[in-house]
Amino acid sequence: MKNSMSVVDVYACIKEISNVLKDARISNIYNIGKEIFVFKLKSKIRDYMLLVEPGRRIHLTQYRLELPRTPSPICMGLRKYLRGGIMVSITQLGFDRIVSLEIKRGVIYKVIAEIMPRGVLCLLGDQSKIIYTSEVKKFKDRIVKTGATYIPPPGSSLKLTELTVEEFLERIRGSPDVVRGIVRGLGLPGEFAEETCFRAGIEKTVKPPDLNLNDASKILTTMIMLLEESSKGKGYIVFRDGEAITVTPFKPTLLVESGADIVEYDSFNSALDDYFTRHPTKISGIPAEALSKEIKRLETTILKQEKLIEEYDQRAERYFKIANMLMQDLEKIKRFLMCVRKERSVLDDWVKAAQNCSTMLGVPLVKCLKEKGTVIIMVNGEEVEIDIRRKAYENISHYYELAKKNREKKKRASEVLIDLKRKMETLIREREEKKRISLIKVRKKRWYEKYHWMITSDGFLVIGGRDASQNESIVRKYLEKNDVFMHADVQGASAVVVKTGGREISEAALREAAVIAVCYSRLWSRGDSIGRVFWVRGEQVSTKPPIGQYLPKGSFIISGKREFIENVPVKLALGVKIAGNYAEIIVGPVELVKSKTKYYVVLEPGKGEPRDIAKRIKRILLKLADEEDRLYIKAVSVDELLSKIPGPSRIVEFPNECSKE
């Protein structure tokens, strides 16, 4: 499974996004965990989220990421120097897994993202001095730390289009086969090398000296064509047995021929986004491999523990059996030990004494262990070690004691085994839960989710601006002549648009949309209980002021007759709807939200701080949720709930019984 982008992936990605992000303004920067950086950019066309994970990936993302409320120190530093800056260029350094973002904010700053293993993210100032780095790194040929001059790692300056056949053969000479020659000699990824050989019709196991000029030329031409294909912007995720194994900017015909399935994307960035975000090797900030490694370690420990328990059991049984056998031959053992002690006093050599007594009494002697002072005799066909210094009963008691100790050890080891198995089960559950939560959290955003939004009971989309800028954006971009424009009859309110799609809007839809208009207005902060809303058709709204006049940002010219909706309750239901493999926060009139989910609360204007209310809502919803649904609600962030709360509030209703907070 591919865990990081190759040099060809970086090449294809930067080709696709360099023009898209040029002249975009950096509106914010976030840091998820220690590894992932997210640059929020605004262009004239739309907003973008550029995700950078040093050592692993760089691409645009359309997924809803859980962004931390408190920035890390490096994130604060990046914001200090870059927020509000303009993206001048985004380039690949040489032909390596290093990306340079040039950002102008008074002066030119550079953000260097190293995508290769042990890579870092650095902010560079004048003369490439490092202002910030994601990690301090010491290599044999360079040091990456604040204040040092940034030196890129030794990389490739490969230019395939300028490479001659003779130079190609020289580069791959000395490799065991052509595919490894392409990887080692040219620094290209294995999947690219194998696809090249497959398309060129050359066996990948051919040794470089066995290549003729024609075959070498065919390989070189195919590589150039494959690199050209990679710059076209298409992407492919490859699946084997239902698991995503790689993502490529070229069609992986070799893998398809070998039975793999592929999903084709019109955008390589979208393919990268889906591959690395929907099929993560990291789960909620904890490396998946670390979790799996711990589980594997526990599995090994459990196997050893089970073997140890079996050994304790076998020893206990053997010692108990020996003690019983000695008990059965008690008189014979007594005579033998008494004889050895008596003979020893005469001979002054206990080994000879034991041998003599064995012959005299018919006790089969196997061996004398002089250093230990013990002998091994045969008892009922079994070899048994007895201590000549002990009496018969003492030897028997010794074996009974050994049996008892091993049974106790077995008991303690069994208790440890139970704990180990419980721990492993917990870890497995935790890993699976986090996997599911990670998939829930990374749901792809729909275009309207940046605004206040709602779907009416009869299927009309309602969107409302969060601020003056969004109010203007909604009207300019999305208001069509047959749509409905709605506004609370008060200064300071969300511009609300009901997308009709050419259908006739119902009274029910108008009243439902009116709740969004009044709740996301100054009426909420004033503490009003009801409000009035006016609405007009889209064709009655204009963003252009009359000649010679000025129209403030977020303001509009309304012409013609206005329709009014009276007595709209300033009351908002907020719920979590489980849809497919994710949790979706929905808002709207109480009855509408009740009809769509069983997990909801009802809010009215109050004195509770919005963040405190958001935290309390999450606790309530978690208590209300079924076991299966609780996992989805865990994935909902407090910040996301907070974005739906109009202002200071109080919770006035929720379903079922729920204990006080």
Image (spheres, grey):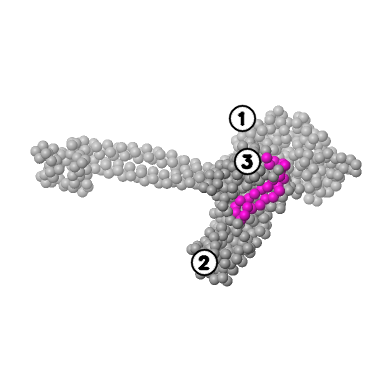
- In the rendering, at what x and y percent does residue 259 appear? 55, 62
Taking the image as drawn, is residue 239 in sight? no
Please count the marks in the image.
Answer: 3
Q: Quadrant of the C terminus?
A: top right
Q: What stretch is highlighted in magenta?
A: 81-106
Q: Comparing marks 1 and 2, which lies closer to the viewer?
A: 2
Q: Comparing marks 3 and 2, which lies closer to the viewer?
A: 3
Identity of the amino acid at label 1?
A: Glu
Residue at 68% across, 30% down:
609
Q: Say which mark, if any, is on residue 131.
A: 3
Which residue extends farthest left? Answer: 346
- Could you say which is closer to the camera, residue 507 or residue 342? 342
Q: Say which mark, if any, is on residue 208.
A: 2
Identity of the amino acid at label 2?
A: Pro
Whole-angstrom CA distance, mark 1 to mark 3, is 46 Å
Identity of the amino acid at label 3?
A: Ile
Query: Quarter of the image holding residue 433?
Result: top right
- Could you say which is closer to the camera, residue 536 or residue 503? 536
Residue at 18% across, 44% down:
368
- Could you say which is closer to the camera, residue 413 or residue 239? 239
Label pair 3/2, CB-CB below 8 angstroms: no
- In the rendering, at what x and y percent does residue 290 appear? 50, 45
Q: Earlier in the sequence, mark 1 or mark 2?
A: 2
> Is 649 situated left or right of 72 in this image?
right
Q: Residues within 10 Å of mark 2 (few under 14, many from 20)?
A: many
Label pair 1/2, CB-CB below 8 angstroms: no
Residue at 59% across, 40% down:
146
Taking the image as drawn, is residue 462 in sight? yes
> Is 409 situated left or right of 128 in this image?
left
